[in-house]
Amino acid sequence: MERHEMWLDAFSDTQATIYTFPNCVATADLAGDGDYRLIIADIGTGTIPSKLKVYKGTGLQSEVTLQDIPTAVAPMFIDNDSPRLPVITVGTSEYIYVYKNLRPFFRAVLPPLQINSVERDIWGQYDSEETLFELLKNLRSQIGMSALTLKSQHLLTLPQHERHSFLEAHKGTPLVRKNIVTCLSTLRKSHNEDDALACLVIGTENCEIFAKLTLSDVPVFLSTAGLFDIDYTLTCTTRSGQLLIGRRGWVSPLLSLSKPPVGVVCLDTSIIVALMDATLNCYSDKGCRVWTVPVVSPITCLYRVHLRQRNLEMVAVGLHNGHVSLYTLSGECTDTIFFNEPISALYFGQYGRECSSMICVTQGGSLHVKILKRSADFTPELKEKGAGAMAKLQIPKKTKLFVDQTMRERENSIDAFRMKLATARTLVHVLNTKQSPIQESVKLSAEVLGLGPSFVVRIGVMNIGPKSGAGSTGISDLALFFHWNDKFYDVSPPIIHVPFLVPSVEVKFQAKVESINPNGLADVIRVIVLRKKQAQPILVAMINMPPSEIVF
């Protein structure tokens, strides 16, 4: 099958005049009817203001004017009301705007930052414009431009003939140091379903992420994975070119990138990073480089492609020459889509009622939507085609070393067989009695019900292996073991035996948790998935219990 047959052209609008950033495109079921809308935060132009645009099908359904240039847009569920309708969160400047039913719902403001005392004294005691400018310039060299207030930053960027009018116009304006949103993402709380409750993860200009993490530099690209109540991973890149990884309560630098980053995608065990030197890089969660792939043009954006029906993960890479290339997690190019303009934003997900839609916005303002065919084949493209691929293999001649080794194996065939037999027996012993490197494909979800002191913990166990094919197998002989601090809780039953798990079917269990702490303090309960007659756990999850109500 030819490559251009993998996608269907849904529609293209070359007159859409959409100018946006990579993180300002998303889709969501805003009406609860299963028809997903396209959400785009348009940054506008010099004469056209920024707008939040919502597309239905091939036409523009509605638009809302924004007060400032958007940084990112993220649809999410914040309640369990019926019908299940998501909200749209938009980060602009120091504000987080939330829209529900395409109307403003509420606005959150990031807390302002503390003003430098030296800067405050300079503005309160200066005697001339030249003195004020020099003092602020010296202070900027000491603490940095981002540590100054907006008033000082604006003054330092003005030419000399405009400073007097600026000071007269802002004579009574108070000093304010705003905390600006630099990146935005969402993280599901306790379930991995599409309509599960989620929380916002916000990166700010103050070198922090609003998941209680403090960074060494300003975050610019942010990607999340996991569940907030169980275990999660935050991956971000900074302006200085650092790649950081964070989990609950801590963050650490993973490595320093050779070039400034263009985008980052966080997966379960690997991190994909695009750099400005036209390379796509894959790193493990330990910071080891797995592979590096050069591309034919500078990379402009990066997005994760998840095909659930095929259990396939890829990344879509937008290039400056108008190409969109799809790469597997092993670094192989599987397909390339061609456009006439440089790519500014990509999104892959459900649009309308099609679950595999590729949405592309170009730098010229065009909007393109393509639908993936169900018969698409993502076999990696051959690097060499034609007669060169069918060339005869060059087999080297037999060397004297090879001949001598063959003679030794022939003379000592019995000892060689015994060595292979001993190796096989050792491997069987390791697999049966010691820590096996093979991991089961098991997913765990947890939910805490109740206000205390009596709780119910609902545990869901699912076999996430393939549904069909040669690798389709069930999982048996599993058990759930609860580990807790006996000064805080009493859990019953402590062990739950799991029945045979077929692929893609979630089995739920319940355990009663009684809070015995007199002050109602909370602690962590660990759920350990074990296989019978094996000492190494298959999976460990931590449940953060809520504080218990005190019974008088």
Image: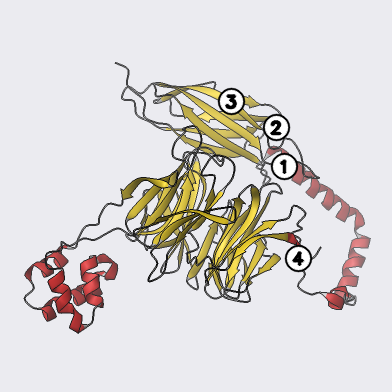
Residue sitting at 65 percent across and 67 percent down?
325
Please, is residue 185 above or below residue 100 in the view?
below
Q: Which mark is residue 3?
A: 4
Closer to the chain start, of discs 3 and 1, is 1
Residue under label 1: 431
Q: Quadrant of residue 178?
A: bottom left
In three-dimensional space, the C-alpha distance between marks 3 and 1, rounded to whole angstroms, equals: 29 Å
In three-dimensional space, the C-alpha distance between marks 4 and 3, rounded to whole angstroms, equals: 46 Å
Q: Amino acid at mark 1?
A: Leu
Residue 141 position in % (x across, y down): 24, 75
Please state if 446 lies on the left or on the right of 201 as rendered: right
Closer to the chain start, of discs 1 and 4, is 4
Please, is residue 384 above or below residue 465 in the view?
below
Q: Nearer the viewer, mark 1 or mark 4?
A: 4
Q: Which mark is residue 509?
A: 3
Q: Which mark is residue 312?
A: none
Q: Nearer the viewer, residue 56 or 2?
A: 56
Q: Amino acid at mark 2?
A: Leu
Mark 2 crowdedness (10 Å alpha carbons): few <14, some 14-19, many ≥20: many
Look at the image and tell me whether residue 343 can be seen: yes
